[in-house]
Image (cartoon, rainbow, N blue to C red):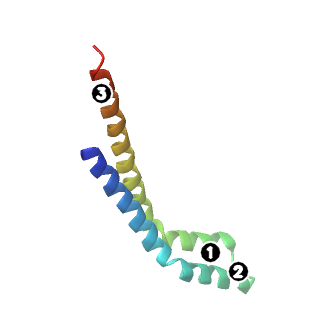
Amino acid sequence: MIAGLLYLIGLIAVLVCVAIAGYSAPAMIASFTAAMDAGNANMFEVIAALAGGLAWVIWPVITGLALMGFGRVIMLLSSINRSLRGQG
């Protein structure tokens, strides 16, 4: 039960973060396209500025993936425990 909740909470966290980050994607694409069309833009500076705008997404996504991983490990260990309990 706990493993399923951990997995579900992690999945929701990742999906919400990706959806919120995707909501700002059209503006980021437009600013990148405008910078590249200007001709004198430094590509590394433009990409660094765009990545800085998405820096907040890193930790919630990593945390959500870790929660999903912990949930899966607990599910695996409980299934191994159930299968070995029958042998004895």
**Residue type at the position of mark 3:** Asn
Query: In the image, which is nearer the foreground, mark 3 or mark 1?
Result: 3
Q: Measuring 30% from the left and 17% from the top, which residue is drawn there?
A: 87
Q: Nearer the viewer, residue 19 or 52?
A: 19
Work out which residue is located at the far front of the displayed protein and give it: 86
Tag 1–tag 2 contact (CB < 8 Å): yes
Where is residue 58 drawn, in percent x and y?
A: 44, 60
Mark seen at residue 81: 3
Identify residue for label 1.
46
Residue mark closest to the camera, 2 vs 3: 3
Q: Which residue is mark 2?
A: 36
Marks 1 and 2, the one that precedes in the sequence: 2
| Residue neighbourhood size for the residue with mark 1, other residues' Cα within 10 Å, grouped as few (<14), some (14–19), many (≥20) | some
Cα–Cα span, label 3 and label 1:
52 Å
- The amino acid type of the residue labelled 2 equals Met
Q: Residue at x 38, y 57 (%)?
A: 11
Q: At x 33% / y 55%, what residue is drawn?
A: 8
Horizontal side of 48 relative to 42 (left or right) equals left
State if disc 3 and disc 2 touch (CB < 8 Å). Answer: no
Above or below, 22 relative to 87: below
- Residue that lies at the very extreme toward the right in this rendered image: 39
Q: Residues within 10 Å of mark 2 (few under 14, many from 20)?
A: some
Tell me where residue 22 appears, x and y as whole percent: 49, 73
Nearer-the-camera pick, 60 or 48:
60
Identify the image quadrant of residue 27: bottom right
The residue at 73%/82% (across/down) is 40
